[in-house]
Each structure stands twice: as structure tokens, then as C-alpha cells.
Amino acid sequence: ILNVEQSPQSLHVQEGDSTNFTCSFPSSNFYALHWYRWETAKSPEALFVMTLNGDEKKKGRISATLNTKEGYSYLYIKGSQPEDSATYLCASGPGSARQLTFGSGTQLTVLP
Amino acid sequence: SAVISQKPSRDICQRGTSLTIQCQVDSQVTMMFWYRQQPGQSLTLIATANQGSEATYESGFVIDKFPISRPNLTFSTLTVSNMSPEDSSIYLCSVMEGGTEAFFGQGTRLTVV
């Protein structure tokens, strides 16, 4: 995998459902994996920065896991709420490139 | 954390004109990054702006089209020149603190008609 890829591109769930999405990234020369939440008309906001293989981080109802050997990370949202509606971006880097490489995002819509 | 004020938040521009986007950071930072997100695409790095030197552009982006200024350690501008409908995108400025977490401006949603 040369680029950072996210799936699905978009997702609609009902309020209260749990959901998850995937980020795939190059496993060679790994430095860090970032997750951001981007709400419309607002700045992207950092959720997690993960560096260790097998790491799992949690913030409220949102959690993320990291597998650096196979090059993927999962983001989980438990009991989705309408305010979780946003685009979720993952990014790999910066490392020696001193820049982040972003995926195209997963657009989540939580229906009340 | 860094707080970045970016403006304008949105604009609709005629083709052939230019738009300058401004970003003000509440602290001094060495590097500022300018990104573009075209519809359905990834956030793509346009260039890295360093104070006191020319910006470093990524492949596919040139200074004549996207001139950047970085007059001090808290401010930068990106100009989108001679615009065409293909320049319709969200433009974001960003800084990284501690080489890890990135902070972003609110974005500029540009529509070229």
C-alpha cells in the first residue's frame, strides 16, 4: 500500500448503533497514525495519535486500534449520536518526510 | 495546542481572478502547511511555508499558481492565482506541534464559477 486509504467513503447509521471504519497505510517506515474528526465549517480536530503496534486508545465512546505490522487502524464509535456526524480522517507520518499523508476520509452521518 | 484563525471561510470567485487566504497562529511556529481537498479526494499538501525562505512545493504545485508568503512566525498567506473551476476546493492551513499532532485552520471553501 503506497497511499493512505480509508473505507468506507461514507456511512449512514441510526442513532444508538455502533460503527467502525478502517484506515490502511504503508507499514514500512512507519512513524505515527493520526485520526481527526472534521465537522462541517470547523477545523479538523485531533482524536488520537498512535505510535505503538497493538496500541488501543479511547476517548469517551470513540476508540481506535493500531496494527503497524500489517498497516491498518480501526476507529470504533459506540452508541453513535447525531453529534458524531462528521468526516473522520486518518493520516500517516510525519517522520522524516516532516508531513502527514491523509486518506480521503469516511463521512459519517448519524440519523436521529 | 495552537489556535489558527483562517479567512475567508468561503468565497465564490470568477474564473481568471485570484484569491488570497490568510492564516494567523496564536504562537510562533517554524513551519506552516497548506493543504487542498478537492471534492471526494484526500487532503493533499500544496506546500510547506518557512519563515525567511521560499516555500517548498509538492509535486504538481507551482509557485506561479500558488504563491505563498510567510512574513513572520505567526502568519502566512496562500494565493490561488488565475483561478479555474478545477481550483474549487477546501483549502486548509496547518501547523504541527512537537512533530506529532496537527492543528488546522477552519478552512476556506472556494467555488470558482
Image (cartoon, coloured by chain):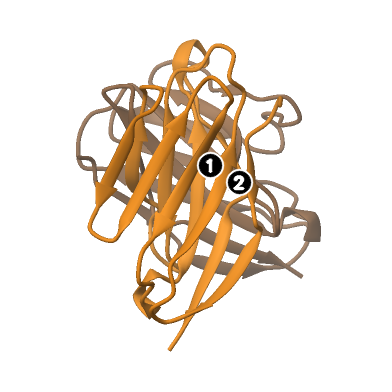
Chain colours: A orange, B brown
> Image quadrant of residue B17?
bottom right
Whether A36 is drawn above or below B109: the answer is above
Q: Residue at x 37, y 24 (%)?
A: A51
User: Neighbour class for label 1 at 10 Å: few (<14), some, many (≥20)?
Assistant: many
Q: Is residue B102 above or below residue B82?
A: above
For disc 2, the neighbor class at 10 Å (few under 14, some 14 to 19, many from 20) is many
Q: Amino acid at mark 1?
A: Leu
* Label 2 SS: strand
Relative vertical location of residue B19 with respect to residue B63 in this rendering, above or below: below
Q: Nearer the viewer, residue B61 or B104?
A: B104
Q: Nearer the viewer, residue B48 or B102?
A: B102
Identify the residue at horizontal 34%, vertical 46% (top origin): A46
Among the 4 quarters of the image, the one containing residue B14: bottom right
As drawn, the label of residue B36 is 2
Residue name at image x 71 percent, y 26 percent: A1
N-terminal-most mark, 2 or 1: 2
A83 relative to B2, above or below: below
Residue ID at (56%, 47%):
A22
Badge 1 marks a residue whose secondary structure is strand
For disc 2, the chain is B
Residue B86: give x, y in percent of width and height: 79, 55
Q: CA distance from mark 2 to mark 1?
A: 11 Å
Amino acid type assigned to the residue bearing label 2 in the image? Arg
